[in-house]
Amino acid sequence: ELGEYVHLMGRTMHPAEELSRFNIFVLTSKFEGFGLVLLEAMAFNKPIITSRIPAAVEILGEDGAAIFFEPGNEKELAARIENLDSLLDENFIQKQKERLLLFDDSKMEEMVNNAYCT
């Protein structure tokens, strides 16, 4: 009976439109190559709950931009969702903005060029 409260997105051709309607963003992946969806969620100032996978930690850091849970641990995930307000860093939006700066276009271009040219 969660249908009116929980929406499983799947793929969409209009991510900005969809993200703007979210109250929170939850990523339950056991693996992500990069985690672009996390950057997109941060761009919309959404509280993020994500599995503690390398890509998520690299993008979000561990200073309060998101709330982590161990991959595959559905009880921990449920507890994070239920206790979101008490777990969410009060400055999460500012911390997300700082993390987004690490992945802006010019920095990403420089990193890709360095990876291919060295």
Image: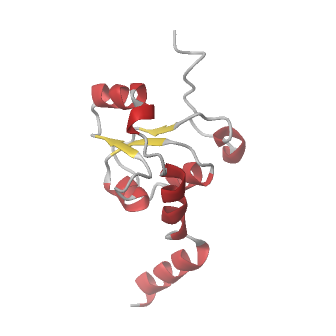
In-front residue for pair 49/110 = 49
Give the image's coloring scheme: secondary structure
Q: Residue 111's spot in the image, x, y percent?
A: 47, 79
Q: Residue 95's spot in the image, x, y percent?
A: 48, 58
Q: Residue 109's spot in the image, x, y percent?
A: 55, 79
In-front residue for pair 65/17 = 65
Who's the residue at 55% across and 52% down the image? 42
- The quarter of the rendered structure image containing the C terminus is bottom left
Who's the residue at 34% across and 27% down the image? 79
Q: Is residue 4 above or below residue 43?
A: above
Q: Is residue 4 above or below residue 16?
A: above
Q: How many dots with numbers? A: 0
In-front residue for pair 82/36 = 82
Who's the residue at 40% across and 25% down the image? 82
Who's the residue at 44% across and 90% down the image? 117
Residue furthest to the top: 1
Residue furthest to the bottom: 118
Q: Quadrant of residue 70?
A: top left
Q: Quadrant of residue 55?
A: bottom left
Q: Residue 67's spot in the image, x, y percent?
A: 38, 43
